[in-house]
Image: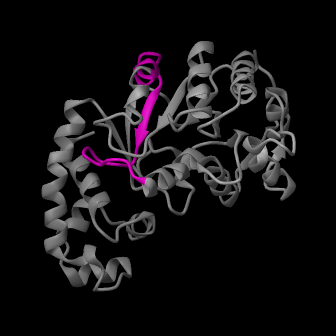
Amino acid sequence: MESGQLELKIAFSMLRGCDADVARAMEGAGMELDEFFSYDKQRLSEALGASPRSPFIEQMNRDEARFKAREELAFVERHRIRAHFLLDDSYPWKLREAKDAPLVVYQLGETDLNAERTVAVVGTRRPSSRGIELTGRMVGDLAVYLPGTVIASGLAYGIDSAAHTAALDTGLPTVAVLAHGLQMIYPAQHRDLARRILHSGGSLLSEYRSGDTPYRQRFLERNRIVAGMSDATVVAESPVKGGAMSTANIAFSYSREVLAVPGRPSDETSAGCNLLIRRQKATLVTCAGDIMEAMGWTPEG
């Protein structure tokens, strides 16, 4: 991608008030990014149907965003990171369907983000041995019957890392969606796992710029990318509260398939899965065959 255009895309994503709706309005108006940044306030406001008080209408704010974007562009080019803008053909098209899709996702790695099948596998950070074993078996069987299926998760402790590891061990591509910029890995204990993901042809993905550090809200925001880029979200094991439940509810709100592995009523680590099934937000699954049946996928392996 030509550096000048990439700078404008990054700058657009940095502007307060700019979101997917503004980008779509710009596309609908037939406006190019260089026009967005060069139009005067009145012309830009009228073309987008935006309030003159919107922060991105101010020329000073647009100029400042371009200045900041140059530093981010240098980081992206130095580390061979790909930046996918919402309106680009390379942007994950499943994620683009989400109303709150991020304007830019940064990708380190070579995974096809528009693969035919992407399955998110999520769950508790404190899984049981049963949850770990079942996650590995489901992912392993997907590798046998549906080679090339991308496994998406969040690089967290527990089920997330089990899903990534199982994908690596069985030859499936895997994408780790991060809640911070690509200058770091959190948790630090998963640096080796992140390296394995990259060396295997997988990817690290984030909407955050270099220097952005993780905090609670960003983990919640990250979950919408995991859900949005996936055809189906599998909750392998989860209590009633937690990030996996957030991801499942977001996937449900996107009208994506949610699948959950049931547990005994006395199992706290399965209480969330049982709740999703009881409220008819998730289809009950116990193996890869159940996932394939729910999705209407025919075995290929």
User: Which quarter shows the N terminus?
Assistant: top left
Left or right: where does residue 184 sit relative to residue 272?
A: left
Q: Judge by depth and name the residue closer to the eye, 286 or 40.
A: 286
Residue at position x 32%, y 83% from top? Answer: 46
Residue 119 quadrant: top right
Q: Which residue occupies 32% across, 43% down?
A: 181
Counting every numbered tag in the picture gives 0
x, y (%) of residue 163? Answer: 61, 28
Q: Is residue 252 above or below residue 122?
A: below
Image quadrant containing the C terminus: top right
| Residue ID at (42%, 34%) | 187
| Magenta stretch, residue numbers | 193-215
Q: Is residue 213 magenta?
A: yes
Give above or below for 198 relative to 20: above
Q: Which residue sits at x=25%, y=67%? A: 36
How are the residues colored? Answer: one colour
Magenta-drawn stretch contains 207: yes
- The location of residue 238, given as percent across then percent down, is 70, 44
Where is residue 223 drawn, in percent x and y? 54, 50
Residue 165 is situated, as x and y percent measured from the top left of the image, at 57, 21
Whether residue 115 is visible, yes or no, is no
